Image (spheres, helix red, strand yellow):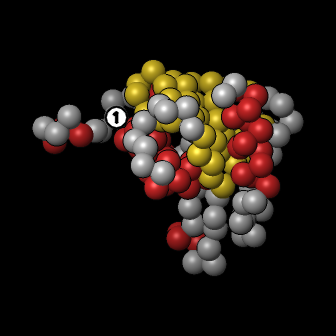
Amino acid sequence: MSLEELERVARQARDNAHAPYSGFRVGAALRSASGRVHAGCNVENAAYPEGCCAEAVAIAAMVVAGEREIAELFVIADSPEPVPPCGGCRQKLAEFAAADARIHMATTGGRRAVMSMRELLPGAFGAAHMGRG
Ligand code: THU
């Protein structure tokens, strides 16, 4: 799947975002090691802290499908600048993405940025710190 296709899936996912509180809809699409694509959108809740980010939902979809490795991720929102994953999502992504995995960020208006997982979360805490890596 090309980057353009990944963007298309992320845009479609964003269309289904449940964001009545922030009004900020986010879509994410990730390609796993097998080549399959898993999508997510943000899902907010009247109890605000219970909301989920688009990236977290895409990760959950990947795990439900029996996969564990993120090859590439695309996240998109209607913002002036490409939206980077929040701190919590960086940690969630680092669980399943190698340090050189590419995280693409885009605006609905067509701006793009890309960073590696290593750049997004340098010095990440991981399984190795517990002697499990
Ligand atoms: N949000 C995401 O889904 N992903 C991000 O990378 C940044 C923030 C969501 C969470 C919340 O529903 C809304 O955007 C505003 O913070």
Residue appearing at x 70%, y 26% in the figure: 3
Extreme residue toward the right, this view = 109
CA neighbours of label 1 inside 10 A, class few (<14), some (14 to 19), many (20+)? some
Indicate whether 20 appears above or below 7: below
Q: Position of residue 90 (x, y in %)?
A: 47, 41
Q: Position of residue 114 (x, y in %)?
A: 63, 24
Extreme residue toward the top, this view = 100
Residue appearing at x 56%, y 50% in the figure: 58
- Whether residue 15 can be seen here: yes
Residue 101 or residue 118, whichever sits in front: 101
Choose top left, top right, bottom left or bottom right for residue 103. top right
* Residue 18 relative to residue 39: left or right: right
Count of marks, rendered view: 1
* Residue 39 relative to residue 99: left or right: right
- Whether residue 79 can be seen here: no
> Quarter holding the C terminus?
top left
Q: Position of residue 71 (x, y in %)?
A: 50, 29
Residue 61 or residue 46, whichever sits in front: 61
Extreme residue toward the left, this view = 131
Residue indicated by mark 1? 124
> Quarter holding the N terminus?
top right
Residue appearing at x 72%, y 60% in the figure: 17
- Cβ at disc 1 under 8 Å from ligand 1: no
What SS does tag 1 mark? loop
Q: Position of residue 112 (x, y in %)?
A: 74, 27
Choose top left, top right, bottom left or bottom right for residue 98. top left
The amino acid at mark 1 is Ala
